[in-house]
Image (tube, grey):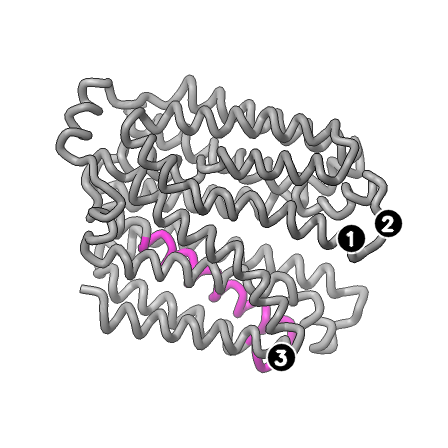
Amino acid sequence: MTNWFRNQLAVTVASFIGFMGFTLVMPFLPLYFRELGLNDTGEIALWTGFSMGVTPALTAVLAPAWGKLADRFGRKIMVERSLISFVFVMGAMAFVSEPWHVFALRAVQGLFAVYGALTLTMAAESAPPHRMTDAIGYVHTAQRLGPALGPVIGGALAHVVGLRNTFLVASACYLFAVLLVFFLYKEATPAAQDDQEGRGRVSFRDVLSFENFIILMLVVFGLQFIDRSFGPILPLYLDHAGVPAWRVPLIAGLIFSVAAGGGAIGNYVAGRLLATRDARSILAASAIASMIASAVFAIEPPVWVMIMSSAMFGLGIGVAMTTAYAQAGKVIPQGSHGTGFGLLTTASLTGLALSPVFGGLLGSTSMNAVFVANAVGLGLLAVVVIRKME
């Protein structure tokens, strides 16, 4: 087994396990707050919102700094540090007794949670240049499939062993991911790293000045913002569209799963598309495909059309996201991907943090308007890419 393939296997599987471990428990946080003694629905929603939002908010702020440290001291040790922190934090959540304990632990997670961006960096830098897009696509696929399967597995575990013990299972998942990276991933020798850093280390300002990088940050932000915006209102939208109440959870889950599956396929095929087409045309076409799918949702079509549109929507988002990261990887010097991908992660997490707020506020006035706004946003992204990207 070649070094790069072993490294790819390590970071892909570790990403899948890490992202799955996170979603084993986080979707059920409102139920956990009820176990901790909260009974008022508004109070539960408040604690859930703050606890869910604090981690991506802190990670968005700190991701570039962790990426820069990884460029200097090595990616492997930083990913191990991040995953080990999750082992302890997830384990500690099984023993909390007050809602503020959960919030505090989620804040601690935000201080160290940047392994997603760093595994992308590790995959990009360990792969041969002609396989870098494939390497990024595999990790992106793992990061999408993990959250798609996590809630299903977590729901079954919570039913069998209880929510508290499910946190311990999540902790064990992160421990396995740490061991996988520790034993399988082979980082470049210190001498080789020093040589790369001497030639390639750059500042944040340098990265932002690279060709098309600011546009790519905008694309990543926009894609993440739009991808997560309809989550808060989808069940209500299905009810509004006439889906029987007893079928709403099933149909909503199916739409989310199909969109995630389409995104995973898109992450995978992006490399094949980049082999024959330029990034500019792929990004524009992918945004337009997702725009059409979002516009179809806005007209309240039959359920089977919604499901097909969700597949098209996810496929476009997946292709565009991997293409944006791959294109960024090509313009960032070897040895400085941590800094660049850290900035892209900040853009992504900012979109993730703001998106549910936007969806909820706009959905409170008109749920159809959320899908119309998404279609308009994707159309504007396509125009920016076509007109501004070189």
For the record, the magenta segment spans 297-324
Nearer to us in this view, 35 or 253: 35
Q: In the drawing, does residue 369 fall left or right of residue 40?
A: left
Total marks shown come to 3
- Residue visible at 29% across and 44% down? 340
205 up-or-down from 194: above or below: below
Residue found at x 54% / y 23% = 176
Q: Earlier in the sequence, mark 2 or mark 3?
A: 2
- Measured Cα–Cα span from mark 2 to mark 3: 35 Å
Residue 337 located left or right of residue 349: left
**Where residue 60 appears, x then y in whole percent?**
45, 47
Q: Is residue 191 left or right of residue 297?
A: left
Secondary structure predominantly adopted by residues drawn in magenta: helix
Q: Which residue is mark 2?
A: 39
Callout 2: few (<14), some (14-19), or many (20+) C-alpha neighbours within 10 Å? few
Which quarter shows the C terminus?
bottom left
Q: Which residue is the site of mark 3?
A: 300
Circle 3/circle 1 CB separation < 8 Å: no
Secondary-structure class at tag 2? loop
Residue 4, how many percent across, how many down?
A: 29, 29
Q: Three-letter amino acid code at disc 3?
A: Glu
Whole-angstrom CA distance, mark 1 to mark 2, is 8 Å
Which residue is under mark 1? 43
Quadrant of the frame with the N terminus: top left
Q: Nearer the viewer, residue 24 or 358?
A: 358
